[in-house]
Image (cartoon, rainbow, N blue to C red):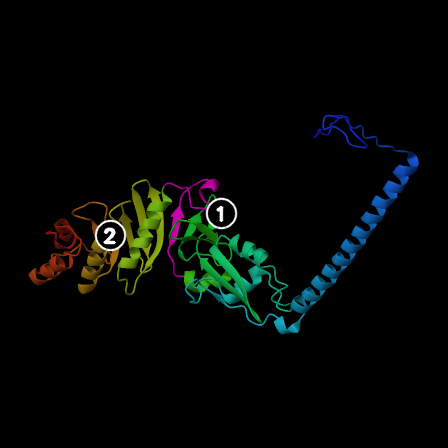
């Protein structure tokens, strides 16, 4: 049998893999016009669809806005003001907080800008931190941590008036000053006044910890008063005399000199001396508590400190055991 002869020629439209193909793209102004028209039609359809969707979203948002913001079912009815433990605030009254917050009680709870309310309250020097939340259907709840005053601040060259409900400046336990308000008067009217001779305006910036170098010692003295049983008397003014002396005036007219340190011991000395004077029908007029022993003092009648009887001396020794050194007894037990 003869084998069929094969040929390597390409028949018909068959091309070799190595053949090159030329692609021509023909264009003309007419072709470009129709292509642009087609693209424009597609864009128009897209814009129409987006517009319909946008209008639907707008109408939907307006309906939601009207339902929540203008619906009387969500009208503001309750704005409780508490501390973060749920108790009543000590200094800021509800009325004062409402005034500072700017909440419109004729609006709904959704119309109130809670971020703006928090900023207004948080920017106040008398407020440490604040949290404002909504509670359906009628409540905007305000929780805040306020600065509780422990003393007034007085300084002539700064125009600080001391115990003044309108223009006075108060200090909290951290030494941060803040402006007084008439609503603070009930809690602040009996607080002692820390008086400074002269200081710079930058030493006391409202809402910032004081930078004065002497006032913190006077503030520490005021804080120590919490541990003293003051019956029938209180501290009226604490005057910073210099870097080592505090001149103190009590509400019953006693002038006492304290150092910048050891206030616990010195206050206990003062209580012992005062009680001793009362037990002898006298009243203290002046006492210097800076020396560690033999503290000089004077009665209002002008008499000197009398010698204790033995049983009184033992009572003083027993009372002085709670944190007082043995030399403290010399104030009242000194021999003349």
Q: Residue at x 75, y 58 (%)?
A: 53
Label 1 to label 2: alpha-carbon separation? 32 Å
User: Image quarter for residue 309?
Assistant: bottom left
On whether residue 201 falls in the magenta region, the answer is yes
Could you tell me what secondary structure mostly forms the magenta stretch? loop
Q: Is residue 12 above or below residue 317?
A: above
Q: Position of residue 305 (x, y in %)?
A: 17, 55
On whether residue 196 falls in the magenta region, the answer is yes
Q: Is residue 161 above or below residue 132?
A: above
- Secondary structure type for disc 2: helix
- Disc 1 marks which residue? 159
User: For this view, does 72 lie left or right of residue 161?
Assistant: right
Q: Residue at x 78, y 55 (%)?
A: 49
- Secondary structure type for disc 1: loop
Q: Residue at x 48, y 48 (%)?
A: 206
Query: Looking at this rendering, what residue extends furthest in the front direction?
Result: 1
- Disc 2 marks which residue? 264
Observer able to see residue 317: yes
Residue 145 is labelled as none
- Give whichever of 144, 27 is nearer the camera: 27
- Give whichever of 124, 243 is nearer the camera: 124
Q: Position of residue 302 (x, y in %)?
A: 23, 55
State the extent of the magenta-drawn residues as a range.
189-213
User: Image quarter for residue 223?
Assistant: bottom left
How many C-alpha atoms fall within 10 Å of the one at disc 1: few (<14), some, or many (≥20)?
A: few
User: For this view, does 116 lie left or right of residue 165?
Assistant: right
């Amino acid at each position: 049998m003869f084998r069929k002869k094969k040929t390597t020629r390409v028949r018909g439209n068959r091309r070799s893999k190595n053949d090159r193909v030329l692609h021509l793209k023909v264009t003309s102004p007419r072709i470009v016009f129709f292509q642009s028209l087609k693209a424009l039609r597609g864009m128009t359809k897209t814009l129409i669809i987006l517009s319909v969707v946008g209008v639907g979203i707008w109408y939907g948002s307006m309906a939601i806005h009207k339902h929540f913001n203008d619906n009387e079912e969500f009208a503001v009815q309750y704005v409780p003001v508490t501390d973060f433990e749920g108790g009543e605030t000590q200094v800021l009254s509800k009325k004062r907080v409402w005034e500072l917050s700017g909440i419109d009680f004729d609006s709904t709870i959704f119309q109130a800008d809670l971020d703006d309310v928090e900023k207004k309250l948080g920017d106040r020097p008398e407020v440490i931190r604040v949290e404002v939340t909504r509670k359906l259907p009628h409540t905007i709840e305000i929780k805040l941590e306020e600065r509780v005053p422990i003393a007034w601040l007085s300084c002539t060259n700064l125009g600080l008036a001391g115990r003044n409900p309108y223009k006075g400046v108060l200090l909290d336990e951290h030494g941060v000053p803040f402006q007084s308000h008439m609503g603070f008067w009930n809690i602040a009217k009996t607080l002692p006044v820390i008086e400074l001779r002269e200081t710079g305006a930058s030493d006391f910036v409202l809402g910032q910890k004081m930078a004065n170098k002497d006032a913190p010692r006077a503030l520490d003295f005021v804080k120590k008063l919490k541990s003293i049983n003051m019956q029938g008397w209180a501290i009226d003014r604490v005057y910073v005399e210099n870097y080592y002396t505090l001149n103190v005036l009590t509400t019953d007219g006693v002038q006492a000199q304290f150092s910048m340190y050891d206030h616990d011991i010195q206050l206990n000395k003062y209580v012992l001396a005062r009680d001793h004077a009362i037990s002898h029908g006298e009243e203290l007029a002046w006492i210097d508590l800076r020396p560690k022993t033999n503290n000089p003092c004077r009665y209002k009648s002008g008499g000197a400190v009398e010698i204790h009887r033995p049983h009184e001396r033992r009572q003083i020794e027993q009372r002085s055991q709670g944190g007082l050194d043995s030399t403290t007894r010399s104030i009242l037990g000194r021999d003349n």
